[in-house]
Image (cartoon, rainbow, N blue to C red):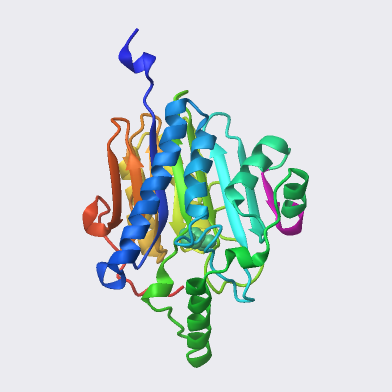
Amino acid sequence: MSIAYANPPVAIVIHGGAGTITRASMTAAKEAAIRATLKASVQAGYQALLKGSPGTEAVTAAINVMEDSPLFNAGKGAVFNAAGKNEMDAAIMEGAGLNAGAVASVSHIRNPINLALKVMTNSEHVLLMGKGAEEFARQQGFEMMDPSYFYTDFRWQQLQRIKAKEATHKKTAQQDQQDRWFSTVGAVVLDRQGNLAAGTSTGGTANKRWGRVGDSPIIGAGTYANNKSCAISATGHGEFFIRYVVAYNICNRVELGTPLAEAADTVINDVLVKAGGEGGVIAMDHDGNITTPFNSAGMYRASIDIDGKLSISIYRDEGEAEGALTGNVEH
Ligand code: ASP
């Protein structure tokens, strides 16, 4: 029996969002806290993989760490919509059999990714939204959180800044640097059984209209997994990721024979850049190859590859990612 067969490789890559993330816009304390949380998240997912858990459990374990942290735009710390509320979206998908579950516009669920998993495993549907999703959550025994649980002063002040700008320059409102961090979270894994899985969880975009749903819970846009090609979780300006069907677009190119890194780079740094769509993806193929292209200044990301090598990065100069948007995109 070969070593590879006796001990099939596992791998994980996570993201905590892309955007105008530069050293100039970061404090040392915040950077240390973000790196520590990325490390805790990627290790939580990796431990689940080492135990032989299904990929979807590793995805939820990793994402739960970031959802429970106020530093990321998912679960606690989710952005506020224009009505001052948190409306969260999440999706999860298995590369074997293309099973998927997703929720949109939920406001009382501590870990929306766990509810997305229940939609996949315990309902006949793929996507539940709003009150219907929360009624399903109650039936599944989920605790209903008071909206105050999701509140963070950072996100509230962000909404006030965006609204103040809107009031003064209605037509050309451009969010300042701090407000161009997306901070959605996601995880992609290869499990011991050789299956890929992907998941994404988000509060969406700050100051969005109530009822707006982004790319994260849309299978094929922000989240996708197929053992025949690859698994993807996206972060960025969701409207573009939906219109360019980014996650499926990359996987389809891989299925047709393009290597993963080239397929992901083309969609993020060519197709999306030409369209003006800012963001990035984490991607993994069936062999555990990982790529993390983004066209924004930075992307919070971490991975443990099939050789067990841990890497944690924030800025562009820490890793791959070629080419960049110039930073003048409005959203
Ligand atoms: N893609 C998410 C959305 O548009 C935002 C993000 O990546 O932070 O809802």
Q: Which residues, given as a range, are shown in magenta?
A: 126-132
Q: Position of residue 63 (x, y in %)?
A: 49, 47
Q: Position of residue 101 (x, y in %)?
A: 63, 43
At x 71% / y 58%, what residue is drawn? Answer: 130
At x 44% / y 64%, what residue is drawn? Answer: 182
Q: Nearer the viewer, residue 127 or 249?
A: 127
Q: Nearer the viewer, residue 164 or 215?
A: 164
Left or right position of 296 against 241 = left
At x 55% / y 74%, what residue is drawn? Answer: 207
Q: Is residue 280 visible?
A: yes
Q: Nearer the viewer, residue 21 or 69?
A: 69
Left or right position of 308 against 8 = left
- In the picture as drawn, the residue positioned furthest to the left comes out as 317
Q: Position of residue 331 (x, y in %)?
A: 46, 73
Q: Nearer the viewer, residue 168 or 133?
A: 133
In the image, is residue 129 part of the stretch drawn in magenta? yes
- In the picture as drawn, the residue positioned furthest to the top comes out as 1
Q: Is residue 294 visible?
A: no
In the image, is residue 188 part of the stretch drawn in magenta? no
Q: Quadrant of the N terminus?
A: top left
* Numbered circles on residues, count: 0
At x 28% / y 44%, what residue is drawn? Answer: 311
- Among the 4 quarters of the image, the one containing residue 208: bottom right
Q: Position of residue 256 (x, y in %)?
A: 41, 35
Left or right position of 26 against 163 = left
* In the rendered image, the vertical position of residue 150 relative to residue 114, given as above or below: below
